[in-house]
Image: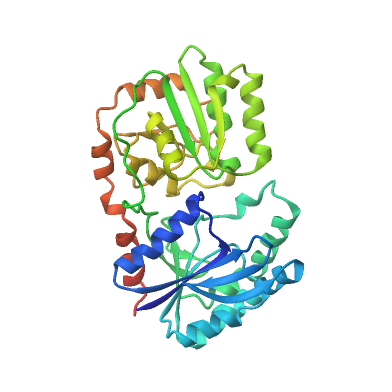
Amino acid sequence: MNILFLVYHALADYSGISKKILSQADGLRRGGHNVYLCTLHFEPDGTQQRICGDSLLRSFGKGFFASAARRMSYSDIIGFVRTNDIDMVYVRYDINADPFTVSLVRRLKKMGVKVAVEIPTWPYDGEFKGQSLKLKFWFWLDRLFRMRFFRYVDRVVTYTQSDVIFGCRTLRISNGIDFDKVQQVSGQSPKDPLRLLSVANIHLWHGLDRLIAGMAAHKEVPSELHIVGDGLPEIIDSYRNQALQAGIGDRVRILGPMSGDSLDREFEWANLAVGSLGRHRSGINDIKTLKNREYAARGLAFFYSENDSDFDSAPYVMKVPADESPVDIGSLKSFLDSQVMSAAMIRASVTRLSWENQMRKVIEGMDF
């Protein structure tokens, strides 16, 4: 089968989302399909391009008008679909329903092409609280056009238990793991002190302020926190200031985005990984995040506050309350001290979550 995997943004080496997209495409290829990954690309001089597979599909130029053109014109994608006999378009939804994306999926539907749209987070309305006016504008536009957009979609791919989203039947999968690209830790780090590692593209719902507050309230428990990732500068600065004001600035390190060997070293250093601690802030109770799966594939125990049906009962996972209370650092230490599963055992427990297995569910559910 010929599949076009459509992404509305550029990819970055350090981004967990980018790694996920590449792994999803590889999972489809391992299933025997011919996959063209279509993304944006930005040249050093600011030139904006659309890339499909190994080919430059279109160059939009630079500046405002180039940005407008890439948001408003998708004729190049229609031409690529027709020329390459594409059977299915798999779209990573960017909360970007508008007259132009509606036109795109409507034309694909008329051509007889199957369309699957992945909504990474659902429901997503709460994620726009406190965002910039620019992002709120795109969200407002999406609310105007999303029902019309999904009228032309065959299936919505979701990581929730929802049967229908925006009037469209869903395919329920889990976020997956590319075991070839996620290195298992070589052994267990010492359990003292508590070495906490958070890897995330940081937003309000990661809730690391709750963890820093817990560290400040329980200074008698030796603990250190490393925060790896990019994100909203004002939130990252608030974490730094919170730690300094609490007198634990030397125990909280904000390291920025990492990949490759430097990221591997952070996982070797850690003995307990940090999942999301504030999903309730955006109105989400059930979710299957990438970070939980990477932690398990690495072979680390971890904790979080949401519901994740793949891990809620796992012996190497601790659930903390989904509220605004400081995280109980003493309980984390007791949980870590009780762990008996090796890194290899934790990793082996999630082999069912390979991207090949998860993307196979998508193909089987498309009714070809």
Q: Which scheme is used to colour this image of the protein?
A: rainbow
Work out whether 37 lies above or below 247.
below
As drawn, the residue found furthest toward the front would be 45
Q: Which of 85 and 161 is in front in this view?
A: 85
| Quarter placement of the N terminus | bottom left
Left or right, residue 154 beside residue 74: left
Work out whether 75 lies above or below 19.
below
As drawn, the residue found furthest toward the top would be 220
Picture coordinates of residue 265, whole percent (x, y): 41, 35
Where is residue 261, by image quadrant? top left
Picture coordinates of residue 146, whole percent (x, y): 60, 69
Q: How many marks?
A: 0
The answer to whether residue 311 is seen in the rendering is: no
Looking at the image, which residue is at 68% across and 38% down?
A: 234
| Quarter placement of the C terminus | bottom left
Work out whether 359 lies above or below 152.
above
Picture coordinates of residue 224, whole percent (x, y): 48, 23
Looking at the image, which residue is at 55% across and 28% down?
A: 253
Q: Nearer the viewer, residue 263 or 68?
A: 263
Where is residue 354, by image quadrant? bottom left
Left or right, residue 132 beside residue 315: right
Q: Which of 127 and 182 is in front in this view?
A: 182
Looking at the image, which residue is at 34% across and 58% down?
A: 355
The answer to whether residue 23 is seen in the rendering is: yes
